[in-house]
Structures are given as structure tokens and as C-alpha cells.
Image: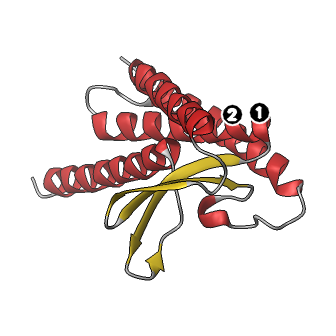
Amino acid sequence: MSGWRWLPLTAFVIALDQASKAWIERHFALFESVTLLPVLDVTRLHNTGAAFSFLAGAGGWQRWFFTVLAFGVSAGIVLWLRRVRARDEAWLAAGLALILGGALGNAIDRVRLGYVIDFVHVHWNDAWFPAFNVADSAITLGAIGVIIDAIVQSRRQRAGAGS
């Protein structure tokens, strides 16, 4: 079975991401914030750049650049998933499915709105970390899954070479 078996996870990430952003749009004005924990706020922010607002002030070209990049990477991931053995490479397949869902979730925002809605805002004392969303979280967790798979595969190869 191919890694396409994990595509429902991608669909779930996209649905959860878009639903959470729609809820934030309905209930929060831009920059409105609610403290949930001493280190965690929900704050509606708009990110016209990439991760950590990279290139946010670049003049507008970045919207389409990051949109095309997201769809290109997504196409590559779909092709990669086709070749992944879902059972033997579960960490890789799940990781790629999460990355795919996150990339498409943020790309939908860029096409629909021209920016990405971020709302999870973590801070410690006066240190404020860049806000993020469900899609960003899925990309991060997916990258961790891909790294775990690389470690597992490396150990398998070393164990096989030692036999």
C-alpha cells in the first residue's frame, strides 16, 4: 500500500486548520487578544510573509511566490507519498501527510485572503514568539515525523550492514 493511505490525515489537517481560522475570523478583530494561560494568548494576526513573517513587508509579490511554492511542494509530496510504503515507512508517510495538509491550509489562506491567519501566540515574560496556526503546527509535527523516519531508516541500515 502506498503512502496515499495517509491522505485522509491531510484532509483532516486542512479541515481543522480552515475551521479554526474561520472561528477566529468570526470571533476576533485584527489584533484582538485573549489570554488563555500566563504564557499563551489567542491573538488574531495576519501574516503576509512566510514563517515568522519572513518577507512580510516585501510589497506583495511574496503572496504569489509562496502560493506557487506551496502548490509545487505539495505536488512533489503527493508524488513522493505514492512511492512510500505506508506500512514500513509510517513515520515518513504521516509526516509528509501532515506537511502537505499544513502547506495547503496556508496556501488556501493566501489565495483566498492574501495573507495567512495566525492566532496562537506564545510568550515568556517580555519574549514574544511568532504567532502560528494549526497548519504551521502540522508542518512542524510533519517535519519531526520525517526526521524520526530518517533516524529509524539509518538505524535499520546500520543494523543490516552489521549482520
The answer to the question of whether label 2 and label 1 lie on touching residues, with beta carbons closer than 8 A, is yes
Rendered position, 142 above or below 13:
below
Q: Which residue is mark 2?
A: 108
Q: Amino acid at mark 2?
A: Ile
Q: Nearer the viewer, residue 121 or 146?
A: 121
State the image coordinates of residue 13 (x, y, percent, origin top left).
46, 31
Q: In what quadrant of the picture does the N terminus appear? A: top left
Name the disc covering residue 112, or none.
1
Instruction: Estimate the x, y position of residue 79 in percent, counting from the top left.
Output: 57, 29
Residue under the image location 76 percent in, 67 percent down? 55
The residue at 80%/44% (across/down) is 114
Q: Around disc 2, counting alpha carbons within 10 Å, would you say few (fewer than 14), some (14 to 19), or many (20 or more)?
A: some
53 left or right, relative to 16:
right
Q: Residue furthest bottom?
A: 126
Measured Cα–Cα span from mark 2 to mark 1 = 6 Å
**Eyeballing the image, is 43 above or below 85?**
below
Pinpoint residue 31: horizontal percent, then vertical percent. Answer: 63, 57
